Image (cartoon, grey):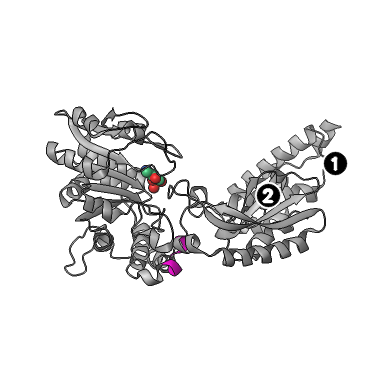
């Protein structure tokens, strides 16, 4: 039976001649269609062998080939609906860009730009010069450099200042951010020697003093951006560390991670360290991400003294890690929003999501729940409940924002099954599972309809 079916399968040559693929052959190469045909035949053979198909219908084989062609040729990066409530969700691409940044991206992408040309002189300019004025204004830094991401910013800063020498860091700040950013490994890969001081919960000024030798190149401070410590703890503050550094001629580098450019308490949020304040407290260099609280494109920003930035720019690694015209265009547009703090919370999507009122979120949740009930029928239970969203992106760890969530349960289906169905929708909807219910947090959803499209697939 099995062998008879396998023999009935058309050959690659026969299949490719089928008029069903004329359009595809015209649009793509013959080689691509041959690949798709081969993959489809291999899959069909497996279906026969496993007993899942019991006859060979050419229409079914053709459909499978067309599916393979679609798989190869359609975009693998698609718009996704973030119904997790996590505003800076790393797996969903962190910050949503502001309209001005999107416009700047289109201009930069569709033509040439003055990336490294000084328009006043026609001479070669520095690409980071396109954003340096804004970053200086917004942070008070003497100079800045922009690289691929904050991990790269930490890496090149340490490599520049401390290669083959000691980087002194508190054991309480040897952080892992997730997604393979672990400080001890970055320090090692940057060619530096890590000198740990203090203990996990307590580090004292004396610990740094005693660690200083002729090989000490940097005092490094890392912001604990994704966890909190409490209880019997003590940390050496930046000001004290700077004064110890001054006495010994050791520069202080601070990795802020999710560096805020403005004071978030103005928006009723807790205080997050501000780049400008850390520099004015005396840090020689501060590094931070462009796509966390700042709300811009992925990049790492190094802000600090002119002398150190000059050295970083001369490091061959700068060429390896530099930002491209798209990043710099989007970053520049995002930074310009900060020049008007009145309109910032409306125009910067990340801040808009953080400051969104529970009433506004509740209205969307109510509307979504009505639409979902209509779409689902009686086997599903759809409720609107209070919930808590987190900011994500290593900002304000441990802090939650009040939100409204739509809770979905089914008579027999598990929450996982509902989760997967929403994820399989077009566009995919990413929610959460909590206490055996599927949860849609509406803080990060713009329109109720965005999550309802996902529901249709379930029916
Ligand atoms: C997020 C973070 C990083 C890594 O930044 P990326 O921009 O993701 O490379 C490094 N250090 C701290 C403290 C962070 O919060």
Q: Main secondary structure of the magenta part?
A: helix
Image quarter of the N terminus: top right
- Residue 201 rendering spot, x and y as whole percentages: 37, 32
Residue visible at 73% across and 65% down? 370
Q: Is residue 373 left or right of residue 27?
A: right
Q: Which residue is mark 2?
A: 438
- Residue 43 rendering spot, x and y as whole percentages: 71, 39
Image quarter of the C terminus: bottom right
Per the model, the C-alpha gap separating discs 2 and 1 is: 39 Å
Which of the four quarters of the rendered structure image does ligand 1 lie in?
Answer: top left
When the figure is inspected, residue 64 is found, relative to residue 161, above or below; the finding is below
Q: Is residue 312 left or right of residue 426?
A: left
Q: Nearer the viewer, residue 455 or 367?
A: 367
**Magenta extent:** 345-350
Residue visible at 34% across and 55% down? 324
Q: Is residue 2 left or right of residue 183?
A: right
Q: Is residue 347 magenta?
A: yes
Mark 2 C-beta to ligand 1 under 8 Å: no
Q: Is residue 342 left or right of residue 5?
A: left
Q: Is residue 61 visible?
A: yes
Classify 10 Å Cα crowding around label 2: few (below 14), some (14-19), many (20 and above): many
Q: Is residue 79 visible?
A: no
* Sequence-first disc among 2 and 1: 1
Residue visible at 70% across and 50% down? 421
- Residue 171 rendering spot, x and y as whole percentages: 33, 31
Label 1: element kind: loop
Label ID, residue 55: 1
Q: Is residue 379 magenta?
A: no
Q: Nearer the viewer, residue 98 or 76?
A: 98
């Amino acid at each position: 039976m099995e062998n008879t079916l396998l023999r009935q399968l058309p050959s690659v040559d026969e299949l490719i001649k089928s008029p069903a693929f004329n359009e595809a052959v015209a649009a793509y190469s013959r080689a691509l269609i041959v690949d798709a045909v081969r993959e489809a035949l291999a899959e069909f053979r497996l279906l026969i062998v496993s007993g899942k198909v019991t006859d060979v219908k050419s229409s079914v084989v053709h459909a499978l080939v067309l599916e393979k062609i679609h798989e190869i040729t359609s975009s693998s990066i698609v718009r996704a609906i973030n119904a997790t409530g996590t505003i800076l969700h790393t797996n969903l691409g962190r910050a949503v860009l502001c309209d001005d940044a999107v416009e700047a991206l289109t201009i930069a992408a569709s033509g040439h730009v003055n990336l490294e040309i000084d328009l006043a002189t026609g001479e070669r300019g520095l690409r980071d010069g396109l954003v340096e004025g804004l970053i200086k204004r917004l942070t008070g830094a003497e100079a800045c450099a922009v690289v691929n991401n904050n991990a790269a910013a930490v890496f090149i800063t340490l490599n520049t200042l401390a290669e083959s020498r000691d980087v002194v860091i508190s054991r309480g700040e040897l952080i892992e951010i997730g997604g393979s950013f672990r400080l001890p490994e970055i320090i090692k890969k940057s060619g530096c020697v890590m000198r740990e001081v203090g203990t996990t919960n307590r580090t004292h000024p004396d610990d740094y003093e005693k660690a200083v030798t002729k090989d000490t190149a940097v005092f490094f401070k890392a912001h604990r951006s994704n966890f909190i410590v409490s209880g019997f703890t003590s940390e050496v503050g930046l000001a004290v560390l700077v004064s110890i550094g001054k006495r010994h001629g050791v520069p202080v580098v601070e990795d802020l991670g999710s560096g805020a450019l403005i004071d978030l308490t103005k928006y009723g949020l807790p205080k997050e360290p501000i780049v400008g304040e850390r520099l004015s407290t005396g840090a020689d260099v501060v590094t931070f991400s462009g796509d966390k609280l700042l709300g811009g494109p992925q990049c790492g920003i190094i802000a600090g003294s002119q002398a150190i930035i000059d050295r970083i720019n001369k490091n061959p690694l700068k060429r390896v890690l530099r930002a491209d015209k798209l990043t710099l265009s989007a970053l520049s547009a995002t930074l310009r929003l900060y020049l008007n703090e009145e309109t910032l919370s409306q125009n910067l999507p990340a801040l808009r999501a953080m400051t969104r009122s529970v009433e506004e979120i509740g209205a969307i949740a109510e509307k979504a729940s009505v639409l979902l009930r209509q779409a689902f029928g009686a086997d599903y239970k759809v409720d609107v409940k209070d919930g808590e969203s987190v900011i994500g992106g290593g900002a304000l760890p441990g802090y939650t924002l009040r939100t409204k969530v739509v809770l979905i349960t089914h008579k027999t289906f598990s929450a996982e099954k509902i989760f997967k169905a929403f994820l399989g929708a077009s566009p995919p909807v990413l929610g959460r599972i909590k206490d055996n219910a599927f949860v849609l947090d509406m803080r990060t959803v713009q329109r109720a309809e965005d999550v309802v499209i996902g529901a249709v697939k379930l029916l």
